[in-house]
Amino acid sequence: MGALPSTDNEGYKSLRERIDTALKLCKEESSIDFKKANVWDELKDIVIKTSLAMANLRDGGIIIVGVQENSGRWEITGLEQEQVETFDPDVILDQVNRYASPPISLDIVTHALGDGKILLVININEFDDKPIVCQRNKHNQSNELVLREGAVYVRPIGKAETTEVKSDRQMHELLDLSSEKMTRKFLEKCGRVGIGISGQGTSDDDKQKFDEELAGL
C-alpha cells in the first residue's frame, strides 16, 4: 500500500477548502457525513452505501472519518496512524465499485489539522452521465441486507441519511441531472467536430455533420 495523498498537496486545494468549511460548520447534511474514527473493515458497509448515494448528488459529497458525536455535539478526534493505514485506496475503490453501476470515482486523502490530528476523507465525485445503481445485494455480518440489487440510493435534500429513491420527485430530480449532463456532453462533442447547432450561421456542411452525429447516437 502506498502513502495516502494529503490535502496539503496543491492539487487538492478545492477539496481542502470544502473540508475546512464542513469542519467549521460541524454539521452533517446530504453532501457531508461524519464517521467515528475506526478501521476500514468496520466502516466499509456504511461507507459503500453512502458512496452510492452521494455519487447521485450534484457535486457529490464527502465522508470525513475522525469526527464523532459526543453529548449532542460533534467532536473532532482524528485517527490513530494504525487506523489510517487500514485505508488502502485500491481496496476501497474495488470494494465500492463491486456494488456500483456504473463505477464511482473516489478520492481518498488525509487531512491534517493545526493541532496535529489527522482525518481520513473520502471524496465521492458526482456520477458521469448515468445515475448510480446498486448492482448486487450486500449483507452485513449479522446477515442483514445492507444493499439491495437494483436499488438507487440518494441523500434527501438537507438530511444526513441515505435512502432508496422513495418518490417521483427524487427520481425526476436524478433524471433531470442525468439529462443535463448528457446534453452537455453532446454539445461538447458537437463543438469538437466543428458542428454549429444554433441555427444561425450554420452551413450546409455543419448541418450534414450534425445529422451524421445524430445517426450515430
Image: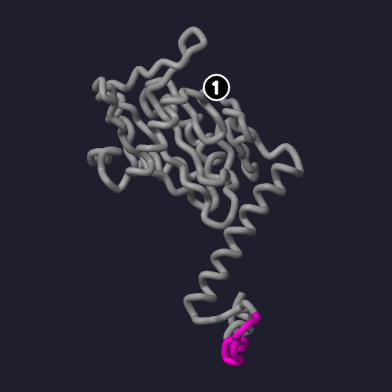
* Quarter of the image with the N terminus in it: top left
**Was residue 204 drawn as part of the magenta stretch in this picture?**
yes
Identify the residue at image location x=33%, y=37%.
109
The answer to which quarter of the image holds residue 147 is: top right
Q: Please state the horizontal and vertical placement of residue 61, each as a whole percent of the image.
A: 49, 39
Depicted 79 relative to depicted 212: above or below: above
Identify the residue at image location x=33%, y=43%.
13
Give the residue type at disc 1.
Ser
Identify the residue at image location x=60%, y=32%.
162
Depicted 156 relative to depicted 94: above or below: above
Depicted 168 relative to depicted 28: above or below: below
Q: Residues within 10 Å of mark 1 (few under 14, many from 20)?
A: few
- Describe the colour scheme in one phrase: one colour
Q: Please state the horizontal and vertical placement of residue 115, each as a whole percent of the image.
A: 26, 20
Observer-nearest of 99 and 122: 122
Q: Please state the horizontal and vertical placement of residue 131, each as a whole percent of the image.
A: 59, 51
**Was residue 176 drawn as part of the magenta stretch in this picture?**
no
* Residue position marked by numbered label 1 in the rendering: 142
The span picked out in magenta is: 199-208
